[in-house]
Image: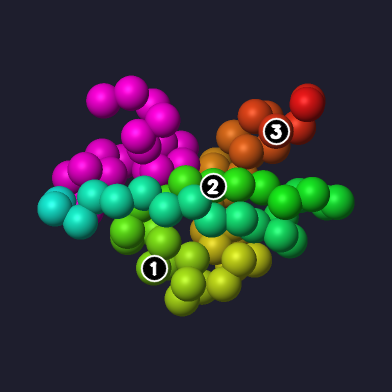
């Protein structure tokens, strides 16, 4: 499975998002507005993490997933 088909959180944490989500393997693009200063960050989230984002809210979600945040910053930070 190519990397683009993975959830950003699962990828950062080394989780198998296909296993985690079973048949509900859909990726949804979410835009985080409060994470990177001055710009929105786009993340791909699997069903499980999509729900988690909804429940936790953006700020707590990124606190829980600092690794993912680090990857985002690295990916988007230079451009
Ligand atoms: Zn995930």
Nearest the camera: 9 or 41? 41
| Residue 49 % position (x, y) | 39, 58
Q: Is residue 60 above or below residue 73?
A: below
Q: CA distance from mark 3 to mark 2?
A: 11 Å
Q: Which mark is residue 43?
A: 2
- Taking the image as shown, residue 29 lies to the left or right of residue 7, namely right
| Circles 1, 2 touching at the beta carbon (< 8 Å) | no
Q: Position of residue 2 (x, y in %)?
A: 33, 23
Mark closest to the chain's N terminus, 1 or 2: 2
Instruction: Say whether disc 3 or disc 2 marks the residue closer to the N-terminus.
Output: 2
Identify residue for label 3: 76
Q: Are marks 3 and 2 in contact (CB under 8 Å)?
A: no
Q: Quadrant of residue 4?
A: top left
Give the number of the disc on residue 75.
none
Q: Quadrant of the C terminus?
A: top right
- The residue that disc 1 covers is 51
By secondary structure, the bulk of the magenta-drawn segment is best described as helix
Q: Indicate the secondary structure of the residue bearing disc 3.
A: helix
Q: How is the image coloured?
A: rainbow
31, 10: nearer the viewer: 31
**SS class of the residue under badge 2?**
strand
Task: Specify start and end residues of the magenta stretch as a single range.
Answer: 1-21
What element does badge 1 sit on? helix
Residue 58 is left or right of residue 78, and the answer is left
Q: Residue at 36% across / 37% down in the picture?
A: 6
Asked whether residue 13 is in view, the answer is: no
Query: CA separation, marks 1 and 2?
Result: 13 Å
In x, y percent, where is residue 28? 42, 53
Name which residue lies at 72% across and 51% down. Answer: 40
Residue 56 percent location from the top left of the image: 51, 73
Query: Residue shown at 24%/50% (left/top)?
Result: 25
Q: Quadrant of the N terminus?
A: top left
């Amino acid at each position: 499975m190519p990397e683009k088909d993975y959830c950003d959180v699962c990828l950062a944490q080394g989780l198998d998002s296909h296993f985690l989500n079973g048949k509900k393997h859909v990726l949804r693009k979410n835009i985080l507005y409060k994470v990177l200063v001055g710009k929105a960050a786009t993340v791909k989230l699997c069903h499980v993490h999509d729900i988690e984002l909804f429940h936790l809210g953006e700020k707590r979600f990124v606190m829980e997933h600092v690794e993912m945040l680090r990857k985002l910053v690295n990916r988007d930070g230079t451009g």
